[in-house]
Amino acid sequence: MTPLFSFLAQQAPAPDAGPMGSMLVPMVLMMAMMYFLMIRPQQKRQKELEKQIEAIKVGDLVVTTGGMHGMVANKGDKVVTLRVADNVRIKFDSNAIARVYPKGAADAPVIEG
């Protein structure tokens, strides 16, 4: 048995994986961490906003992506009409809505007029 062990001990060591092999695991971990810390929460927020937009009713207060505050006067399939002042109604694409405040929400902006 001793000659067998001495023969195995004389075998050449396996070549290193190289610089890419040692960097693969940290890169995969960084990508996974970025997914769970950045991409996944954004997807959840987007789905929640889409549900809120689908549930918009006439009288809800909304804020558009451009910062326009208004009350929903009419809701179509893809277009929402907002009342922003007395006798002023503006049509927006429903994708332009950034925030929805249901009727009676305490933190809703005040629309005068």
Image (spheres, rainbow, N blue to C red):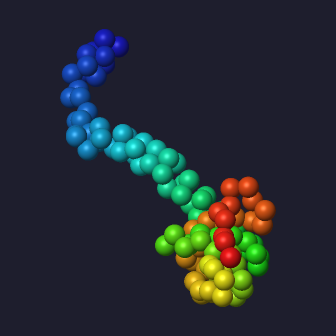
Locate residue 2, reporting x and y percent. 31, 11
Which image quadrant for residue 29? Answer: top left
Left or right, 84 with reference to 105 = left
Residue 49 appears anywhere in the view: no
Q: Is residue 7 above or below residue 78?
A: above
Task: Please give the name of the residue rendered at 61% of the width and 58% of the height, measured from the top-left corner.
Answer: 44
Q: Is residue 66 above or below residue 74?
A: above
Residue 33 appears anywhere in the view: yes
Locate residue 46, reporting x and y percent. 59, 64
As rendered, which of 2 and 79 lies closer to the eye? 79
Locate residue 41, reporting x and y percent. 56, 53
Q: How many marks?
A: 0
Task: Please give the name of the residue rendered at 57% of the width and 83% of the height, measured from the top-left corner.
Answer: 93
Task: Please give the name of the residue rendered at 56% of the width and 60% of the height, measured from the top-left corner.
Answer: 43
Q: Is residue 39 above or below residue 12?
A: below
The quadrant in which the C terminus is found is: bottom right
The quadrant in which the N terminus is found is: top left
As rendered, which of 86 and 25 lies closer to the eye? 86
Left or right, 55 with reference to 94 = right
Task: Please give the name of the residue rendered at 25% of the width and 19% of the height, measured from the top-left corner.
Answer: 9
Q: Is residue 99 above or below residue 8?
A: below
Locate residue 51, reporting x and y percent. 70, 68
